[in-house]
């Protein structure tokens, strides 16, 4: 029997540390054929940005790439055509549609199709690929990122909110955005690999020589991370190390500090071991229009590992205020010091684990599947 196909406009690279789209599509691949579309540009590089232009050129030279990473899970890296002006947007849409049709033919994905939009710039393709229905999965305020064409992204989001059959938001603030645009979204927060993070892990070798205690952050270092706050924390530590695990997407020269260890990217399989090694975990985000709508996956990973967490005041983190220290920026450093000076009892660790024990990615996937399954099972006029 031909399996249905989920066409996921994800944007993110499959091989990077996973976001919600990765976790969900990996689970859906057990029942559907998934075509995961990665690395579609959301921004047009400025002429002065030699590094960005160079990355686009290298990707263009690499051509189209199609690979199967797991049974039922296929990844398409299309030509990275930036949405530069009306001509660039038209070329991006036409080229992307052609590459998707080619990939489906090559893979033999002939089952009924659903389009999943986690990437707003793919909005012009809705309804153009023969899909039975479409899902808007809204997990970030795309137009609030730096260096994007915010009006264009807002227009794309509006088209998806009004045109998709199903709308899902990962945070209450995002749900409010979609309701303003006329959608009736389901609010489905992110999940966590509970067992992966709750287990026992050996100390990573690159942490062995670092002075304890270890205060850790896992995730992208971007301009929504309060880098100055991390330096303030490092300045206050009489001993110990601030450990930062993840790539950098902004200038991090300010983080050159004797008590800050920049580890860079580490494989996702090793992340639970790093989290388990931290005496205190951090969510040091600036509070702005982007971050008040963020539902950090790292929060649940920290808690599943039973670790103490200190966070700046983000609405979705505040919902876990019973097990997380959610504090104003000016109190952040003192809150971390308090954690390090306190005994972390087993009862507190168990309370953190239990707080997210029912929030698995399997449960999240099932909740969303219940919303879109009728699109596949309800006969259409053309089926009769």
Image (spheres, rainbow, N blue to C red):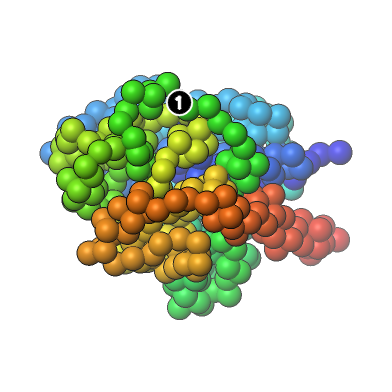
On the rendered structure, is 259 left or right of 324?
left
Q: Residue at x 38, y 27 (%)?
A: 207
Density class for disc 1 (Cα within 10 Å; few <14, some 14-19, many ≥20) is few
Q: Residue at x 57, y 41 (%)?
A: 197
Q: How many marks?
A: 1
Query: In this orientation, does residue 316 appear?
Result: no
Q: Secondary structure at mark 1?
A: loop
Q: Position of residue 247 (x, y in %)?
A: 34, 35
Q: Position of residue 245 (x, y in %)?
A: 37, 36
Q: Check the image and report above or below for 377 versus 172.
A: above
Q: Residue at x 23, y 44 (%)?
A: 237
Q: Check the image and report above or below for 307 versus 327.
A: above
Quadrant holding the N terminus: top right
Which quadrant would residue 136 be assigned to in this image? Answer: bottom right
On the rendered structure, is 333 left or right of 15?
left
Q: Position of residue 267 (x, y in %)?
A: 47, 28
Q: Which residue is mark 1?
A: 204
On the rendered structure, is 305 left or right of 93?
right
On the rendered structure, is 371 left or right of 117?
right
265 or 196: nearer the viewer: 196
């Amino acid at each position: 029997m031909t399996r249905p196909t989920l066409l996921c406009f994800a944007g993110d690279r499959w091989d990077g540390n996973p976001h919600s789209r990765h976790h969900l599509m990996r689970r859906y691949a057990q029942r559907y054929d998934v075509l995961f579309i990665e690395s579609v540009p959301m921004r047009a590089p400025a002429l002065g940005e030699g590094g960005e232009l160079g990355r686009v050129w290298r990707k263009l030279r690499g051509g189209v790439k199609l690979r199967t990473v797991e049974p039922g899970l296929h990844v398409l890296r299309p030509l990275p055509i930036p949405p530069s002006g009306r001509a660039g947007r038209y070329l991006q849409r036409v080229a992307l549609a052609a590459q998707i049709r080619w990939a489906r033919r090559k893979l033999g994905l002939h089952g009924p199709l659903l389009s999943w939009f986690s990437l707003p710039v793919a909005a012009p393709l809705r309804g153009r690929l023969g899909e039975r229905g479409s899902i808007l999965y809204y997990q970030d305020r795309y137009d609030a990122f730096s260096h994007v064409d915010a009006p264009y992204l807002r227009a794309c989001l509006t088209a998806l909110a009004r045109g998709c059959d199903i709308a899902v938001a990962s945070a209450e603030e995002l749900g409010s955005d979609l309701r303003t645009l006329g959608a009736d979204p389901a609010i489905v927060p992110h999940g966590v690999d509970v067992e992966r993070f709750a287990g026992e892990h050996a100390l990573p070798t690159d942490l062995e020589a670092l002075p304890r205690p270890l205060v850790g952050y896992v995730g992208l270092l971007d301009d929504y991370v309060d880098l100055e706050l991390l330096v303030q924390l490092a300045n206050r530590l009489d001993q110990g190390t601030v450990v930062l695990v993840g790539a950098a997407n902004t200038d991090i020269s300010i983080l050159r500090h004797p008590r800050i260890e920049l580890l860079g990217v580490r494989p996702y399989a090793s992340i639970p071991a790093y989290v388990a090694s931290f005496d205190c975990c951090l969510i040091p985000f600036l509070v702005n229009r982007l971050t008040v709508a963020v539902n950090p996956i790292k929060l649940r990973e920290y808690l599943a590992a039973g670790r103490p967490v200190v966070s700046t005041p983000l609405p979705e983190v505040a919902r876990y205020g019973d097990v997380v220290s959610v504090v104003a920026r000016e109190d952040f450093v003192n809150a971390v010091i308090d954690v390090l000076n306190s005994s972390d009892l087993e009862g507190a660790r168990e309370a953190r684990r239990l707080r997210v024990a029912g929030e698995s990615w399997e449960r999240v996937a099932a909740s969303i599947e219940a919303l879109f399954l009728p699109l596949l099972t309800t006969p259409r006029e053309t089926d009769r």
